[in-house]
Every structure is written in structure tokens, then in C-alpha cells.
Amino acid sequence: MTKRIYSIILLLVLMIVPLASSCIEDDFTTNPNDQPTFSVDTLKMGLTFTQWPTPTHSFKVYNPHDKVMSISSIALRDDDEGLFRLNVDGIGGVTFNNVEIRPNDSIFVFVEATLPQNGSALPVNLKRHIDFITNGVAQTVVLSIDGQDVERRTGIVIDRDTRWNANLPYQVFDSLIVAKGATLTLDAGVTLHFHDKAFMRVDGTLRCEGTVEKPINFTGDRTDDILSDTPYDLMSGQWEGIRFTSSSRNNHISHTSIRNTHYGVIVDSVGATEKPAIYLLNSQLRNSIGSVFTVSHADVVAVGCEFAEAGSNVVNLRGGNHIFNHCTFANYYLFAATGGTLIMLSHLDENSDDLSGQPYTSADITNCILYGNSTELSHGDLIGTNIYLRRCLLRSAGTDDENFIDCIWDADPLYYTVRNEYIFDYRLKDESPAIGAANPALTRPDATIDFYGLSRGSAPDLGAYVYTPSTPTP
């Protein structure tokens, strides 16, 4: 009797399994009105360098219905050159058949491309299409990408006077070294994109001849977005930085942005010369994992410059003679709590002597703004040192003395910066106490215009940027 029951149960199971399979198969939607939806109508792949593979981009295909959906065909169109590569739900190719999506579920479509040179100095837009056919109905997602030709440089040593023009951007791999006695001059509008871990070393001389209309840019070579509408240009540590060594001389950097580095700009033990080791005019040093500017026993002049966004101290000064006029020092670093100061000072006197035998640090900081999420200075008491702040705006609630002269204390300059919205703009809002607050007698002749070409006039503003009554575009 028991064996008979088991036999009946087994027979029922064998009968039910095909029925269940038939039910699952019958649970596919065949209604033409039941269509997938897409996370994008156009997949914007941004700017990419030609002859270089793009990062992987993706979008989602959703089945918003209560039955299994079978997409009978997914096919890349208009790409006879084979420039684009697809991966649908983990499978690579350019055409796919009978792709199933479970009810109220989704799949990913991944897209990569490698574009040929386009022979243009400007980016050229390219469009391709991915066609989806579901239940006899066709839908399309557009792929849009801008291809930019570049000059590629790998392990370059500049051993004679050289000028680079701005006909095309440069993509730098490994290293760019200016040898002792040689000068590299960058024309207005030059952009250098450094690959991961690439660096620049200047044993000779660097001249950056940027202008208001055509600034020079040093940055990483990732031109895509981290997330939708969030550019990779926000990321620090994309490349190493620039180091000026002890043999370097007479470096001149004008209207130049140096950003997204690991260690920023380092000026290392250049020593006393007739001219400063580095002269910075209307330039921006920003967004570094470490400091954006580190100077050791070298002389610096910085006029109209922004020093901002560092995971450590923003500026480090150890020895040397320094002039900072109409500069903005700020820190709202995005990727960590800021643990350093805006300006770190060392080798100030016998109590902080670094045993180098070099002269103690001296600095004249005038008509500047020191305000951000970091303490302004590593030393609150500067008495007996050669560090002077004249007519500067500071966050601290201090008082003037022989080193802090005619300063504005406990005041917010009201930048346009909004850290949690990824806006880092150190121009001044309408209500800023820095407007018209500079001492014109302290404004150097080379500080008459700012990075944007605006005149400081007879009643100049504090900091790097001239106030404009209209809201600037971040």
C-alpha cells in the first residue's frame, strides 16, 4: 500500500513539472503595449581622447510589467567601423537576441568606445544608436560622444629650450621633465592632461604664458563623469603634481590652473637667487590629496592667486622669503575632514629651527583672505618672527598686533562655494565684507587685474577675485 502511494505521488510530480514549465513560458508578455523603459534616452559619454579607450558607461533597461519580457533583438546600428563595444547583462557583443527581463526587474547595458583621430583641433561629436525590438515594437537609445585629438607624450625630457603650442591638448604619460638649463614655454591656452601617477619635474625653467582669454591648465586625463552630471574633474589625486628642484630658476606661471594632484606644487630648496624661484600671477592651485603648494627654502611671489582644497595643509612654507598679494587661501576639501591649516609655517625662529642653516621663514601677506574649514595659521602667536599679515580677512576672532596689522577679524567673506553641491567658487557675494576692503597702497602694480581680467580699481577688494554684482556661473 505504501509503495502504491509513493508511485502515485511520483506520477503526480512528473505530471506537474511540465505543467509548471508551461505556465512559466506562458507568463511572457506578448502585448505590443508592454515595452521596456530606459534610464536614459541618450547615453552621454562626454569628452574622450581619440585612439584611447573610454571608461565604461552604462544605462539600465527596465521591465515595469508583471510578466517576463523578452526583448527579441538588441542591436548596435551605424557602427560599421566597430568603434563601440556593448555588454548586455554580462554578455559581450553588438547584437543580442531573446534577452529576458524578469517582472519589475532590470538589466544593465555597458558601452565602451575607441574613436579614431578626427583631424580637428576641436572636439567632434559622434552618434550611434542601439535598437531594441520588443513584441514587434522598436525603441532606440542614442549614444553620443565627443572625440578630441591629442598630442601624446611619454617619458619626455626637455633638454633644450622648447615651446609647446595650444593646437591640441597634451596627454602626458609617466613623466615630463625639464632638464637643468632648459626652458619649457607653454603658450596661452595649452592644456596638459596627466595620466594616473604621471608627474612633472622641473630642473630647469618653466614659463606658463596663460592669459585671461586663454588660461593654461594642468589636470588629469579623466574627462568623463563620476556620476551623471558630476564631472571627474572634482577628483583629487588624478596625477602626482609638479616638483621644482634645487637647480630650477626663474619660473613664471601666469593665468594657470594646476589641479587634481596628489602632492600639488613643490618648490624644493632652490635657495636665494636674484629673482624668486617661482612667480605666480593670477593662477589657481587647487584640489590635492596633500598640500597644493609646498615651499622649502626658496623664494616665492604670488599675486592674485587662489590656493584651495587640500587634504592636508593648503600651503606649507619652510624657510625662504615670500610675498602673497591679493590671494585667497581656502579649504573645503571634498574627500576628507580637513586636518591641516591654510598656511603651515615652520623654521620661523630658534625654537623651530630645522637645522638647515638656512635663513628663517619670512612672509608678507597683504590684502588676502584666509577663510575656510581649516585653521588659518599653524602659529597664532607670530611675535618675534618675520611673518606679517597686513589688511587680511580672517575667520578667527583675534586682534591686531605687530604681526597682524589692520586685519578684519571674525568675518565671513561669503564665497559662492557650496561644498555639498560641489561648487568651489571663491568669488564674492553681494554682502561680502571683503568688497572694497583692501588697502590700495598695498596692491602691487602687477595685481591690477584678476584671473578673469577684471580691474581692481581704486577701491580694491580683498582676495584673488574682483567682486561683480551679478551672480557668477560656477
Image (tube, rainbow, N blue to C red):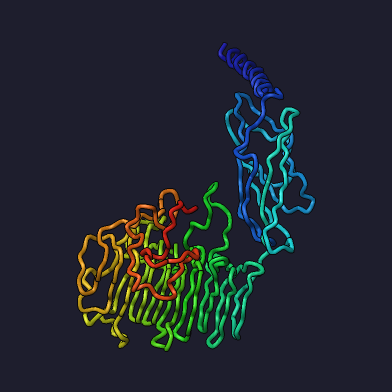
| Left or right of 249 in this view: 32 | right
| Left or right of 276 in this view: 65 | right
Q: Which residue of the protein is positioned furthest toward the right in this rendering?
A: 80
Can you give x and y, in whole percent of width and height, for residue 393 in the image? 30, 63
Q: Quadrant of the N terminus?
A: top right
**Residue 103 or residue 357, whichever sits in front:** 357
Who's the residue at 45% across and 74% down the image? Answer: 280
| Left or right of 156 in this view: 81 | right
- Residue 386 visible in image: yes
Who's the residue at 63% across and 16% down the image? Answer: 12
**Residue 450 or residue 46, whichever sits in front:** 450
Can you give x and y, in whole percent of width and height, for residue 98 in the image? 72, 34
- Is the residue 4 above or below the residue 64 in the image? above
- Residue 14 visible in image: no
**Residue 320 or residue 139, whichever sits in front:** 320
Can you give x and y, in whole percent of width and height, for residue 77 in the image? 76, 44
Who's the residue at 61% across and 67% down the image? Answer: 171
Q: Which residue of the protein is positioned furthest toward the front in this rendering?
A: 458
